[in-house]
Image (cartoon, rainbow, N blue to C red):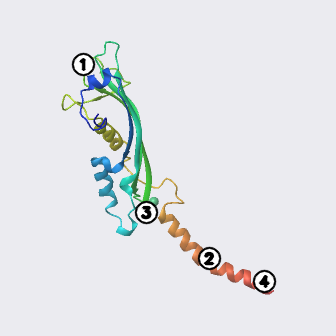
């Protein structure tokens, strides 16, 4: 038995046997996505680079079947998720960003019939066969937001740094004030 995610098989075969694949990989197994994350993290100082960022688990499930009653339209449904590290475009600190993707894809077949079936997107097959890991990787890459920012302003280091500086300037005065009050 080969590797269900990596072996190329025809969509019709995967659909006919109702193949279900549990995804339990690491980010580093997805070469294109790893390259995208790596080039983003490259701007960080080496000592700020998160350890083991390539080890983030990629988990989910794929289920193959047919979208039509005539078994002419192989499809895959499923979901996949991974938490990647990215660089916040406001404070240039590291953001842990969950990527989640739902897959509902038609895999070849007579897609003209299915063009108005908006339950599915059409996956253009380059060959007669498909590598399930490619579907997973593409879905995750599409899930990357255009802009990466800390969601929580309190975590974003730039506002935090300003707040920290503010604390440092007010703190000594507050201490002095409380000392004077005790001496009274
Ligand atoms: Zn930030």
User: Which numbered disc, 2 or 3, marks the residue closer to the eye?
Assistant: 3
Q: Quadrant of ligand 1?
A: bottom left
User: Which numbered disc, 2 or 1, marks the residue closer to the eye?
Assistant: 1
Mark 2–mark 3 Cα distance, whole angstroms, equals 24 Å
For disc 2, the marked residue is 170
Mark 2–mark 4 Cα distance, whole angstroms, equals 19 Å
x and y percentages locating residue 101 in the rendered image = 40, 38
- Within 8 Å: ligand 1 and the Cβ of disc 3? yes
**Dot label at residue 110:** 1
Residue 93: quadrant of the picture:
bottom left
x and y percentages locating residue 18 in the rendered image = 35, 23
| Disc 4 secondary structure class | helix
Mark 1–mark 4 Cα distance, whole angstroms, equals 85 Å
Which sits in the foreground, 102 or 160?
102
- Within 8 Å: ligand 1 and the Cβ of disc 4? no
Label 2 vs 1, first from the N-terminus: 1
Farthest residue in the front direction? 1
Kindly check if marks 2 and 4 are in contact, taking CB atoms under 8 A apart as contact.
no
Label 3 Cα neighbours within 10 Å, binned few <14 / some 14-19 / many ≥20? some
Kindly check if marks 2 and 3 are in contact, taking CB atoms under 8 A apart as contact.
no
Which residue: 59% across, 73% down? 167
Which sits in the foreground, 111 or 64?
64
Which residue: 32% across, 23% down? 15
Q: Is residue 132 left or right of residue 178?
A: left
Mark 2–mark 1 Cα distance, whole angstroms, equals 70 Å
For disc 4, the marked residue is 182
């Amino acid at each position: 038995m080969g590797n269900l995610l990596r072996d190329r098989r025809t969509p019709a075969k995967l659909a006919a046997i109702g193949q279900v694949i549990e995804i339990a990989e690491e980010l580093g197994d997805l070469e294109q996505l790893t390259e995208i994350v790596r080039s983003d993290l490259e701007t960080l100082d080496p000592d700020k680079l998160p350890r083991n960022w390539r080890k983030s688990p990629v988990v989910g499930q794929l289920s193959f079947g047919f979208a039509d009653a005539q078994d002419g339209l192989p499809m895959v449904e499923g979901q996949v998720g991974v938490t990647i590290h990215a660089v916040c475009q406001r404070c240039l600190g590291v953001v842990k960003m969950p990527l989640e993707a739902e897959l509902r894809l038609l895999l070849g077949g007579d897609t003209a019939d299915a063009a108005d079936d908006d339950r599915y997107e059409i996956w253009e097959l380059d060959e007669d066969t498909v590598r399930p890991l490619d579907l997973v990787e593409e879905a995750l890459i599409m899930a990357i937001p255009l802009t990466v920012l800390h969601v929580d302003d309190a975590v974003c280091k730039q506002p935090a740094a300003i707040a920290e500086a503010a604390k440092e300037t007010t703190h000594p005065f507050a201490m002095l004030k409380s000392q004077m009050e005790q001496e009274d």
